[in-house]
Image: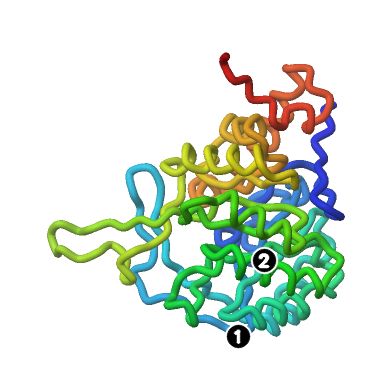
Amino acid sequence: MTDLSVHIGPLKLKNPVLTASGTFGYGTEYRDYFDMSELGGIVTKTITLHPREGNPIPRIAETPCGMLNSIGLANVGVDRFVSDKLPELEGMDTAVIVNIAGSSIDEYAEVAERVQGHPRVDALEVNISCPNVKKGGLAFGTDADITREIVSRVRKTTKKAVIVKLTPNVTDITSIARAAVEGGADGLSLINTILGMGVDIETRKPLIARVVAGLSGPAIKPAALAKVYQVAQNISVPIIGIGGIMDWQSAVEFFIVGAVAVEIGTLSFVQPDGALQVVRGIEQYCEEKGIDTLTDLVGTLQIKQ
């Protein structure tokens, strides 16, 4: 049997397949479809300091090779998450990674402080794609200095693994990745959604109420692979690949370019147990190729000379 376990700082995953934040609810919504303990871990939807209703509808639309979404980080807020949602994950034999966000640097630190002490929380994933109101609505993650400060503040709240989720909507993702590591990140997850939009030509209205949304699904996989490869070539911390992984073959592509783990997003909407099928496909591939440990596959891209 191939050893599929991976380490991201102090976090150990039994296998490299996680669910992506925003696509798997609070971690319990899919439990009737398959045994989630067979996954490496689940990443919760983004948790903020205060409850959020999210953006107006329509906020999801299908595209030819993916989907547009502008949910607006709808969630119950950190207090209810800790009191009502986390207890429902007790006894689940898989890692729980809580995705957190804030509208200010202080809020990031406060949310991290409130969730990190719960025994069911194994790691934090810091979503820095949120708008920074003080900077005219630009995402925190487009500014290296602010990224470094956010991660540093979160790092001070916990000894658990801190993973920083990067936005692709920047000129140089490597500089942002480096700033996150300087701030104390144990790992990086990339990419978040790419900016996109759609139009109804009959009504001449945008498909999404907020007009511009996040594009996910197989359409963004080539861009995601490129970003993971670029960061892996320059940054030494473990990388979690995200973006258009609709089958195990795509996951293997991410390992080859440098990711140690992957997150499954859009696939879960199409096939609720899709993440589990990815695990099984990876395991079979590794056994057929004689790969003893998954880490032997990571970063093995062969460049033609």
Tell me: residue 11, above or below residue 259.
below
Which residue sits at x=77%, y=80%?
Answer: 114
Tell me: residue 244, above or below residue 121.
above
Q: Which mark is on residue 239?
A: none
Find disc 2 in the rendering and name its residue: 148
Q: Is residue 59 left or right of residue 125?
A: left
- Residue 262: percent from the left, percent from the top? 65, 44
Looking at the rendered structure, the kind of residue marked 1 is His
Q: Which of the 4 image quarters holds residue 281?
A: top right
The quadrant of the picture occupied by the C terminus is top right
Labels 1, 2: front one: 2
Closer to the camera, 34 or 203?
Answer: 203
Which residue sits at x=56%, y=35%?
Answer: 247
Which residue sits at x=68%, y=59%?
Answer: 180
Find disc 1 in the rendering and name its residue: 50
- Residue 167: percent from the left, percent from the top? 53, 57
Q: Which of the 4 image quarters holds residue 15?
A: top right
Tag 1 near tag 2, CB within 8 Å: no
Looking at the rendered structure, the kind of residue marked 2 is Arg
Cα distance between the residues tagged 1 and 2: 24 Å
Which residue sits at x=64%, y=52%?
Answer: 189
- Residue 72: percent from the left, percent from the top? 47, 72
Q: Is residue 281 left or right of residue 236?
A: left
The quadrant of the picture occupied by the N terminus is top right
Dot 1 lies on which element? loop
Closer to the camera, 81 or 305?
Answer: 305
Dot 2 lies on which element? helix
Q: Is residue 266 left or right of residue 17?
A: left
Tell me: residue 151, above or below residue 179.
below
Closer to the camera, 114 or 19?
Answer: 114
